[in-house]
Amino acid sequence: MQRKSPRDHDASVTTPASTTESSPIITSTPHPSFASAWFPSSKGKEALKKIPWAKYKSMIASALTTSNPRVLFLDAPSQELLADFVAHAKNNSVKAVLSIGGPTGSRYFSKAVSVPLSRTDFVQAVVDIATRNQLDGIEFAWEYPGQPECDGPSKDDTTNYLLFLEELRKHSTGSRLAISAAVPLAPFLSDYGTPRWDVTAFASFLDYITIVAYDVWKTSFAGSNKLVGPNAPVYDDCALPSARSGSIESAVSSWSRAGFPKDRIVLGVPSHGRVYSVDSIEAQKIGNYPKFDAIPAGQGEKPGTLIPDACNINNTVPVNATGVVTFEGLISAGYLDNNGSLPSSATISNFDQCSLTPFFYNSTREIMVSYDDVNSMALKGHYIRENGLKGFALSDAVGDYNDLLLDSVRNATSLDRSVGPNTTT
């Protein structure tokens, strides 16, 4: 990748000294104090026992919204799992948080907050599920208000979202909960369809936001060119203009300039990468946006399998291959060794000094992988510390292997000093 200015990082150092020449460490910067992760409910009860709870302050489970704003429905197995989740969290002095929305659960948010009556109903539904399950917090994962969903977007989505949060905070239960939001790289859309330049009102009602700073380079962005790009770039200002899909740096800058305090920004970091089918000639361009031929099935995926349509549960749609594979999956498949390093048999690899992320190419299977390793995760942790962010949230809690990624980001943020009972929001 082309670069505007050098960022001479040593990818072999897990706790680097600096991530930019223009951003020196400032001793008065607030110390990161927050370690969190999303728990994938699809992994079931046994996965709860594998979580290193002592290394976290907060853990997030997920729930879907429904077409009826009065009800946040969980089927019997999900309800039972949530009870176990909360019990594990509380037994380990970790805050139990429920995430509402997400990739398939955001489709009815616009309707739920559209008018005063439905907002009040939705507030009560949130309060009820929090009270019933003894939750410590709620995360709203409506990442794209104002953008197309199943029931259509409204130019008033962001304004209505804010009104909903205000009403929730006025409720006696809502006032004591830790309320947060998972957010995209750019601030929520304004009524004019452009990112808001002022989000200070949201900062009045949210304890913190978590920037979803991964899955940045998707097939939808690559478009017809089908290019392999970084999954979770720290920077993209040194990439070609046509390849700037957003980054950690651009996201933090956008949200902080719009008025959200940096010390209340949590950085979402991945324990997964993305796999692409690339021929051997294109593979020579590794780290410089080579073309891919196809996206293979991701870990555990069965492309073509019919699943309920996210917009109409009475219909079915085929599963599309995503190429998503966890760090643990890369190791169990033999692409990485048990230390998370590339074996000597790896044909080509590159640590991209612009995005600060690694790539590797396996010539036998002709696949290229964009992912995060121990070194790139340390650089993300260093960015958190250097820029005074609140902390990190790992997606997800069971995608790591022997806590390699978790320990790396914790060490880089100096969070190991604070292992123990949760005393922060």
Image: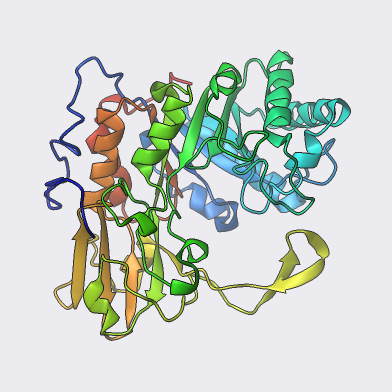
Q: How many marks?
A: 0
Q: Percent x, y for residue 107?
A: 73, 49
140, above or below 389, in the image? below
84 w.r.t. 225: above or below: above
Q: How far across and down, in percent of the image, does residue 372 sit?
A: 31, 55
Of residue 18 and residue 403, the one placed in the foreground of this image is 18
- Residue 133, placed above or below residue 373: above
Q: Is residue 329 left or right of residue 77?
A: left
For the point 36% across and 61% down, which residue is it? 328
Residue 243 appears in the picture as rendered: yes
| Residue 33 position in % (x across, y down) | 35, 25
Q: If the image is split into quadrants, where does the N terminus sit? A: bottom left
Q: Residue at x 38, y 59 (%)?
A: 242
126 vs 102: above or below: above
Q: How is the image coloured?
A: rainbow
Q: Nearer the viewer, residue 382 or 147?
A: 147
Residue at x 72%, y 13% (from the top left corner): 172
Quarter residue 31 falls in = top left
Q: Locate residue 212 relative to residue 121 in the image: left or right.
A: left
Q: Would residue 307 appear left or right of 206 to someone viewing this image? A: right
Is 348 placed left or right of 242 in the picture? left
Question: Is residue 88 visible to the viewer in this orientation of the structure?
Answer: no
Which is more toward the observer, 62 or 43?
62
Nearest the viewer among 121 and 402 is 121
Q: Quadrant of residue 423?
A: top left
Residue 300 lies, in percent from the top left, at 52, 71
Residue at point 58% right, 55% down?
A: 44
Q: Quadrant of residue 249?
A: top left
